[in-house]
Amino acid sequence: MYAQISGVVLDESGYPMIGANVYWAGTTKGVATGIDGEFTIMPVKSTNRLVASFVGCHNDTTVVLNRQPLTIVLIDETVLDEVTITERKMGVIKSRTSAFDTQTIGTEELCRAACCNLSEAFETSASVDVAYSDAATGAKQIRLLGLSGTYVQLIQENTPAVRGLAQTFGLEYIPGPWMSSIQVSKGTSSVINGYEATSGQINVELLKPQLQNPLSVNLMFNSEIMGEANIMGGWQIPLGEEEVHEHEHHHEEGEHCHHRSLYTGILAHYGGSYMTMDGNHDSFADMPKIQNVNLANRWFYRQGEYTFQAFVRGLYDRRRGGQNVHHQPALTNPYLINLNTWRVEGFFKNGYVFDEESGSSVALITAVSYHNLNNTYGARTWDANQLNVYEFRRWRSH
């Protein structure tokens, strides 16, 4: 009765399990397996049920009937499926290093807003208020710290974008799917890009060709017979095999890298509303019918420490409002609103970094825009055009 009981504890693959616990059920009498998974234990009078256990495995209970060597196999208790770890970007980020009170609205927040243009990008954010200032023409006005849009500077990639004649409908000229992020600075901001930033500054970053998908399509249609389509894409343009070999040669010798890369991107937008809105049935359109065509092309080039960016955009915006002659056929001289806008704009950015560690660099930014209006309000016409030229130079040396 007192002969020793021996055996070995293995895993499912047949390998010995070191340090497994072997004990008699209901007692504190037990041993641990050695380096070969083997064990030797003295029997007890109270039970013949021998338990083997190991962390992460199911316990195994064996009824001992004789003194033959035992072979115990432990089965894994938990089998984990593949785990994918993902990072979620914050929708709104508040800068703690900027001298100004700056918030960045990223793609996550823009996706939540499901905005069709910049004027609708702030619907889920309390930092900016946007409201209709004129229902007859559909103009929207932005408010920051309680002040109207004339005191808020709206820039596009740190170049003047919406100013002068473009302020009336400028918020609707930047389609939502084109935007990658928005930076909102409250309070008096920098005057580098103009004097308008009395109550704050809003900077819009557009999609970059080197970061875009080869093709993206965004469509929208609602019950008010209003539709929108956006087609976007970014591609790398091969510059030939000799540049790649040159890059590899310099890289091997530890010399300065002169690898060249060129990207181009297309941003295309069309939006239109075709149904006359007259909710109060006064024969005067509550909102104008709008047709908007927006086409942009941008380029990105880098060679070594030199970077060049170019952006050009053309825009046509047409609005038709006023009295609805279909509801009042007797009107001989209806009050009609016809607004036509043509706009061409572009910018060029050049930058060269002399020493990245010390921050020595030189930059030159040039932006040009031409805005033309051909408007009719009833019997009155209003034609206007505006040309803006902006240039910024910076030299930084330490």
Image: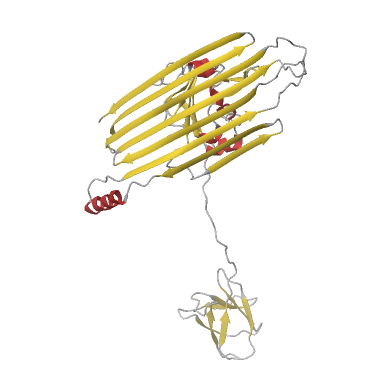
The quadrant the C terminus occupies is top left
The residue drawn where x is 52% and y is 53% is 85
The quadrant the N terminus occupies is bottom right
Q: In this view, does 231 lie above or below 64?
A: above
Residue 358 can be seen in this image: no
Q: In this view, does 217 lie above or below 340?
A: below
Farthest residue to the top: give it: 380
Number of on-image labels: 0
Looking at the image, which is closer to me, 100 or 170? 170
Residue 50 can be seen in this image: yes
Instruction: Judge from the rendering whether residue 248 lies leftward or rightward of residue 88; answer left or right.
Output: left
The residue drawn where x is 64% and y is 77% is 25
Image-quadrant location for residue 367: top left
Query: Picture coordinates of residue 31 (x, y %)?
Result: 53, 78
Query: Picture coordinates of residue 63 (x, y %)?
Result: 65, 84
Q: Is residue 235 above or below residue 329?
A: below
Looking at the image, which is closer to me, 340 or 357? 340
Query: Picture coordinates of residue 350 (x, y %)?
Result: 33, 31
Query: Picture coordinates of residue 245 (x, y %)?
Result: 27, 52
Instruction: Judge from the rendering whether residue 157 lies leftward or rightward of residue 220; answer left or right.
Output: left
Image-quadrant location for residue 308: top left
Scheme of image coloration: secondary structure
The residue drawn where x is 38% and y is 38% is 300
Looking at the image, which is closer to me, 246 or 268? 268
Q: In this view, does 388 lie above or below 19?
A: above
Instruction: Judge from the rendering whether residue 26 lies leftward or rightward of residue 16; answer left or right.
Output: right
The residue drawn where x is 55% and y is 15% is 374
